[in-house]
Image (cartoon, rainbow, N blue to C red):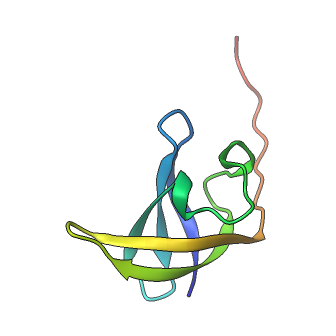
Amino acid sequence: MRGSITQLNKKKGCGFIRGEDDCEAYFDLSSLEGIDIRMLSVGDWVEYQENFGAERLRAARVSVVSHTRTETASTP
């Protein structure tokens, strides 16, 4: 399955991916394969496997397909 990261909380080490099927899957640090969460951004395209957890759809074996970086000016 492929999708894009829609939400990302680097401090908590988790986020959500919206798949091509329009379903949203939760992921955390244990879901990432060879990826440092600090290198991820909202909008990045990833490949993953869907697993059904106790409460929600979970992503497993998440790997980056392409980074979508939108640099914005930061204000102090």
| Residue 72 sits above or below residue 20 on the image | above
Judged left or right of residue 24, residue 20 is: right
* Outermost residue toward the top in this view: 76
Residue in front for this viewpoint, 72 or 7: 7
Residue 37 % position (x, y):
66, 48
- Vertical arrangement, residue 55 with respect to residue 49, above or below: above
Residue 30: give x, y in percent of width and height: 53, 58
Q: Quadrant of the C terminus?
A: top right
User: Where 68 sits versus 40, above or below?
Assistant: below
Q: Position of residue 68 (x, y in %)?
A: 75, 61
The residue furthest left is 55
> Is 16 on the left-hand or right-hand side of 57?
right
On screen, residue 11 versus residue 44, left or right, reads left
Q: Residue at x 75, y 37 (%)?
A: 72
* Furthest residue toward front: 30
Instruction: Tell me: residue 6, above or below residue 64.
Output: above
